Amino acid sequence: MCPHTQALQVKTNILFVINPISGGKAKLRIPTLIDKYLDKERFNANFLLTEYSGHATEIVEEAIAKNFDVIVAAGGDGTINEVASKVVEHGKILGILPLGSGNGLARFLNIPQNLKEAILLINKMKTDRIDSATFNHKFFFNLAGVGFDAHLSSAFSKDKKRGLAGYIKQSLKEVFSYKDEVYNINIDGADYNRKAFAVTVANSSQYGNNVYIAPDASVKDGLLDVCIIKPFSILKLPVLSYVMLKGTAESSDMIEIIRGQKITISRTKDGPVHVDGEPLKMGKEIEISINPLSLEVIVP
């Protein structure tokens, strides 16, 4: 072999899993933008659009069997959850194009909300490891919980109109009739009996749109923040909203935050939960645990 022959650069196989309806916006231009801004000397790019709930998980399973090393979730926190759940299992690399209505995890990781900038970020391939967690063995990466948030996720999933405006409208409709529940919460062996409007288990700090439930949470500390929103008069709803928008939940008397690694939530009956914003139904007892630094993700 000629000593001056340069070794051919081996390209990385990258798959973009695109949710065409996340955030209420059409996503048909995304492959065009990726084709324009992705470094073709570095990547062999493929695109697949999801067609139903759970489809992203199936797509990723097939892609991993075909030697895709980087899987990019193009959607909101629910799409990220489906993709990352398989990426973390198989030790691959996650990329994110934030296209949801809230983009809680992407905002926490400082991934650009601008699509062009988010694609250019992937070209740099700088990665970091973050914690994942499980909620009755179902992975989550941002937030999971019970109570009003779960009830709202279930109601919102039945609404054909996506996006922030629809979410706010649904929230205001549901909040007036919602009844607080009693929970027994065990955190690393200590018991807490609480009546609560909602109990949110936070890996990162926010729901999305810079609405903070756990402002001091970190995806790299090996801990989960259990955020208990106490019962409140409906007249104090603007105060709760202000606390979350200002990121002052840690000092608010409306929210109690306890950190831990192994958590059990017990309630009086089966009911809705949400896992990264996606509604599910689970039983009376929910076991939650943290998996430190288990997911490799592309970050700024």
Image (cartoon, grey):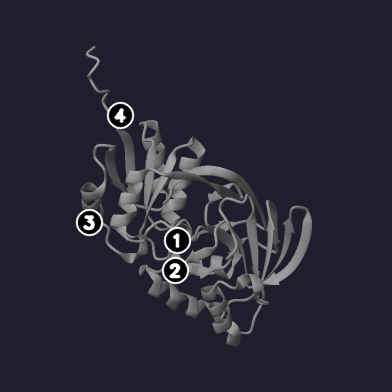
- Which residue is tagged 2? 209
Crowding around mark 3 (Cα neighbors within 10 Å: few <14, some 14 to 19, many 20+) is few
- Name the residue located 55 percent from the left edge and 48 percent from the top edge: 132
| Residue bearing the label numbered 1 | 107
Residue designated by label 3: 29
Residue that label 4 marks:
10
Secondary structure under badge 3? loop
Foreground disc of the pair 4, 3: 4
Residue 71 in the image: x percent, y percent? 38, 43
Query: Is residue 229 in view from this perspective?
Result: no
Q: Nearer the viewer, mark 3 or mark 2?
A: 2
Gap in angstroms between the C-alphas marked 3 and 2: 23 Å
27 or 250, which is in the foreground? 250
**Residue reaching furthest to the bottom:** 235
- The mark total stands at 4
Q: Are marks 1 and 2 in contact (CB under 8 Å)?
A: yes
Amino acid type, callout 3: Arg
The residues tagged by marks 4 and 3 sit, at their Cα atoms, a distance apart of 28 Å
* SS category of the residue bearing label 2: loop
Q: Amino acid at mark 4?
A: Val
Amino acid type of the residue tagged 2 in the rendering? Asn
In this rendering, the answer to whether 253 lies above or below 193 is below
Foreground pick, 271 / 10: 10
Q: Residue at x 78, y 60 (%)?
A: 191
In space, the residues marked 2 and 4 are separated at their CA atoms by: 39 Å
